[in-house]
Image (cartoon, rainbow, N blue to C red):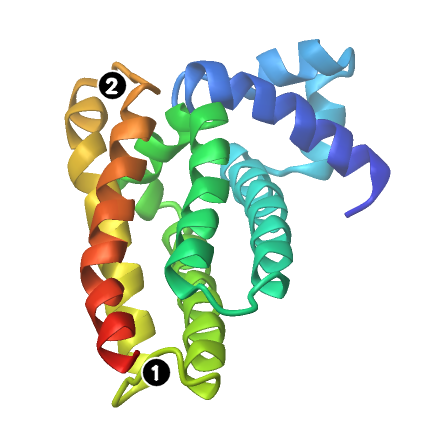
Amino acid sequence: MDRKKEQIVQAALKRFSHYGFNKTTMSEIAVDLNITKANLYYYYPDKNALIRDVLAYISEEIFAKQYEVLKQYNGGLVEVLCKLLEVKADFLKDYYVLHINENLEWIKGQGIGTLLEQFHYKNIEIAQDLLAQATERGEIELSSVEEAAVSYTEIMAGLSLIRSVADTISGMPNAANVDDILVSQKKATKLIFQNKIESKN
């Protein structure tokens, strides 16, 4: 991403994080950047293209931090899984309005659903990488690492959605829900994996 596009994405991110995608206009973003609307449209032909780049920008940051956590794995599967969840929770607190907007149908109809699906598969890939390492170390036994990674990722996503569905429907975000989401996800993680690890020892 070139420097000008990055500046636009960062300005848009501030607006989107505060007001959501739907209530932010391209004109407001142009004013924030002190450029003409025509100049903004030169880089982004429509708001959906800009939303895609904003979501990609945030996700790249999240995945980079998660891979740093992944590198720290030296045993202690549950601890590392919980650290990965904490990384996501930190971003979720900053961008909670975007999180509840991701669940709205109008976004999925704008070509953004494909991008969100890619992020989902990236989350599965990270979980699979960690579970494969834990299996190789003999920390845990799984009949299928891939199936376990898919199921675990879907459970975590489901818990996040359940906790934020009221905010999605009402459109009134409450970022304090992120702490509740994290607690639920950590409890589920321990429930899923702790007994499997202990049974190996």
Query: What amino acid type should be assigned to the residue bearing mark 1?
Result: Val
User: Which residue occupies the foreground of this view, 59 or 11?
Assistant: 59
Q: Is residue 104 visible?
A: no
Residue 129, compared with residue 66, is above or below; it is below
The mark found on residue 171 in the picture is: 2
Mark 2 surroundings: few (<14), some (14-19) or many (≥20) residues within 10 A = some
Residue 81, compared with residue 162, is above or below; it is below
Residue hosting label 1: 145
Q: Residue at x 20, y 68 (%)?
A: 195
Q: Quadrant of residue 201?
A: bottom left
Q: Residue at x 64, y 56 (%)?
A: 68
Query: What amino acid type should be assigned to the residue bearing mark 2?
Result: Gly
User: Which residue occupies the foreground of this view, 125 or 52?
Assistant: 125
Determine whether the residue tagged by mark 2 lies in a helix, strand or loop: loop
User: Distance of mark 1 from mark 2, alpha carbons?
Assistant: 37 Å
Q: Is residue 115 visible?
A: yes
Q: Position of residue 44 (x, y in %)?
A: 65, 37
Q: How many marks?
A: 2
Residue 46, compared with residue 36, is above or below; it is below
Q: Position of residue 116 (x, y in %)?
A: 41, 53
> As drawn, is 47 to the left or to the right of 9?
left
Q: Residue at x 68, y 16 (%)?
A: 30
